[in-house]
Amino acid sequence: MTAPTAAPATSGQLATFRLDGDLYGVEVEHVQEVLRSQQLTRVPLAPTAVAGLINLRGQVVTAIELRERLGRPPRPEGTDAVVIVVRLHGEAVSLLVDSIADVVDVDASDFEAPPDTLEGQARDLIRGAYKLHGQLLLALDVQKAVSA
Amino acid sequence: MDGLDDIVEEFLVESHENLDQLDADLVALEKEPDSRERLSSIFRTIHTIKGTSGFLAFNRLEEVTHVGENMLSRLRDGELELTPHRTSVLLQMVDTVRSLLTTIEASGGEGGVDVSAVVANISAAMENGDGPATEAPAAEAAPAAKAPAAKKAPAAKKAPAKRTTRAKAAPAPVVEETIEEPVAELPVDLPVEPAPPAVVAEENPVSEPAVADHPEGEAAHPDAAGGQARRAVADSTIRVDVDLLDELMLLVGELVLTRNQIVQYVGRSTDTDLVRASQRLNLIASELQEGVMKTRMQPIDHIWSKLPRVVRDLGLQLKKSIRLEMEGRETELDKTLLEAVKDPLTHLVRNSVDHGIEAPEDRKKLGKPAEGVLTLRARHESGQVVVEVADDGAGIDPVKLGAKAVQRGLLTQEALGRMSPADILQLIFLPGFSTAAAVTNVSGRGVGMDVVKTNIESIGGTIEVESDPGVGTVCRLRIPLTLAIVPALTVECANDRYAIPQISLQELVSLDAEKAANAVEEVGGAQVYRLRGELLPLVRLTDVLGLTSERHDGHVVIAVLRSEGRRFGLVVDRVINTEEIVVKAVGGQLKAIGLYSGATVLGDGTVALILDVQALARRALRTESVDRQESRASVSEAAAAETERQRMLLAAIGGGRRVAIPLDTVTRLEQVKTETVEKVGNREVVQYRGAILPIVRLDRHLGAYGETDQEVLEVIVYSDHGRSVAIVVEEILDIVDGEAAVRSDIDDMGLLGSAVLGDKVTELLDVRAAILAADPAFYSHPTTTPAGVPDSLLEV
């Protein structure tokens, strides 16, 4: 596994997903699997970003609501989240996103640091943007995203 | 084998393993004679065997290994060069050691195995590395012939082990082949170095017993067969990597979960075959779980065995004479848990020796025997292991302890004033607390009990301390049997399910709306429930978790939990089930909340959080502790006044007299046929549940004269510490609350006084006197309750 935070501008493959209209990406090597919406067990008194616990084939995995984490409005009623299970330091954590998109090859030369106007929680979690054809792909810092 | 004691058996198992390794090492060493690492490893192995054999008084074994060790140490230090001949001699030594071990295993002694030839060979080889042709064959012939003779059972077992190593040097021979091929071919396959005859001989001593070169081979054969019939010590146990066991445990855990799911689904099915299959699955899974758990179980003696030494050394150092007693040393618990309790237990023992037991002269002054007694007790109790460290020392004085706590600024004088002695005792678990007047290097540095407590709690256990000033102290650890699978109660709260480990659960109380309205009372704003007279502070799970209860019908379900020696009632919406749950770790974010000890997957696949009862108690009771302590104090006052607030059993004893007996002291109510009453001396007894029950007739005891010709006697049975007495009354009338009673102090023999209960004057029975009348020895039991009314009888 490579440490994503060490080198902000990396080439490689990102698994991309949509969240509140934007396209985000996480290093494909961190992604263990993608699941349809799962039954969540809420955890009282947990940080708001912790959406609950998921039963992943007998393993208990914490689910992080990425919308909450990025300071976005809650997912509209009636739409199900997609669960991305990522594995960090041997521990599985899952991220709740709107929908999953393609795996994209990115090039370091397209990378740019986050714009200065980006504020708040999101600034810590977004390493920068890859300028893809027609749109921006925001590179998510998975480590920080899951340490809610 | 039966005659071998554990140490020898362990030695044999270990040595056999080491020898197999040694064979491999020696052969590999031939290929790389310069490998210091390998030589050191071989040296260590032989050294270990030598050391142990010396200790166990196996002199010949020691002799052989001693010369071998000498040679190895010189080889290791580079003084000698490893030649093929020396390797052969070393292999011979290994064989001799092996045959010695076999003999020891079979007969318990070294038997007739002759070692002088090998010893001579090794000594010779130390001087002469090449093993000149003139001497070597002669020297080697003797052990060669001897080796198979003494080899017996393990030869067959060892051969494959040897084979794998040999195979590297000479790829051809494999076990099966050797058996089929004529023996003459073997030397051809062997390495080109001067192959020691001993090696050839052992290639197939069992499969070819009639080889002419080995006249003793025949004699060895019957032994070999016998050896194979019974399992050799080394074969009856295997060493397994703990990781593998952990993995198995994990899988079994998953299986249990799946089993739970299947059983739940099948419960709704009507297909009898399916139901039957699921029942079998249920059974097998349970047995498998038990079996796998057993593989990880070790007797507590493993950690206790080190303690006599600790106690002895400490005792000497502190000039105290202490006798260590152990009860229940065979009690088993999970290996990981065993490791985890080792240090806390040692600490408790050191503490008892250092602070608990007084110096001999002080003990004599107090009229105690000079020798202090430290007792370790372990037992299984409702799915837990209870370990007690008890001493008969000075005990802990709550007054001193409280003063110290105030002095250290750990709590205020006012707070102390509100605490009961039992609560004050728990102060010793506060960080930075030590009451030792002088800091010794044994303990008393202010670290200790709080660490012990933290360690015990980290494995899901609890610790409590009880002390009787002047009499002694008992530290009691409650430890779960295993960490992986725990029995738990599942409850529902605000539509979510939570699991509560059974270890903290004492009982469940369910109150319907009508009862709840009366039974749940308030003390200074905090809710309490009167559980058999004692006020139980109530904690609503919904309040703790910041949720809203889904239960609106007024029913109250209380789980009575115990944490750190205190009880409290957790109010939940409803109780779902008890089930075995597999504890799963939760991520760091959830651990930080400090309310959940983990999570689990329930039978239907949903995730449930496991409540950390200790943390819950700390969080919820902090604000209520003042009230709780007040209420506790009032309860103990009530207990001191004996009959106040107590439930009373009303009984008629004839002549219109009524007697009230505290309900606490009643174990059972029975009816006994008059004709079954027998006489022993001038006492009346009755056979009851296989024991002889002494009888006291209350009418005669109190000087009333009731009807004596009843056919059936109404009997109140009172039991304590395995002794029982029967109190005969004329009729059992009622159970009343003794609270509102008006009391007068008209005293009479056998009575405590009288009161108005249910509009009639009722005499309050002196239970102690009544019992003594029936069984004068009743209270002379060493651990009897001091007062006449044992208040612990109906406690849970």
Image (cartoon, grey):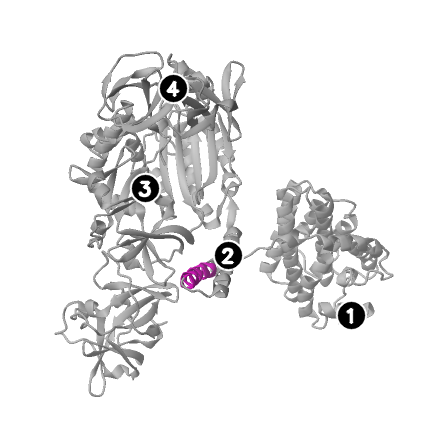
Q: CA distance from mark 2 to mark 4?
A: 49 Å
Q: Is residue B456 visible?
A: yes
The percent coordinates of residue A122 (x first, y second) are: 18, 70
Label 1 CA crowd tier, 10 Å (few <14, some 14–19, many 20+): few
Residue annotated with mark 4: B768
Classify mark 1: helix, strand or loop: helix
Image: magenta residue range: B250-267
Q: Determine the chain carrying the residue at label 2.
A: B
Q: CA distance from mark 2 to mark 3?
A: 33 Å
Type of the residue with mark 4: Arg
Q: Determine the chain carrying the residue at label 1.
A: B
Overall secondary structure of the magenta stretch?
Answer: helix
Q: In which quadrant of the rendered view does residue B719 lie?
A: top left
- Residue B256 covered by magenta stretch: yes
Q: From the image, which quarter does the C terminus of chain B lie in?
A: top left
Type of the residue with mark 1: Glu
Residue annotated with mark 1: B180
Pair 2/3: label in front: 2
Type of the residue with mark 2: Leu
Pair 3/1: label in front: 3
Type of the residue with mark 3: Ser
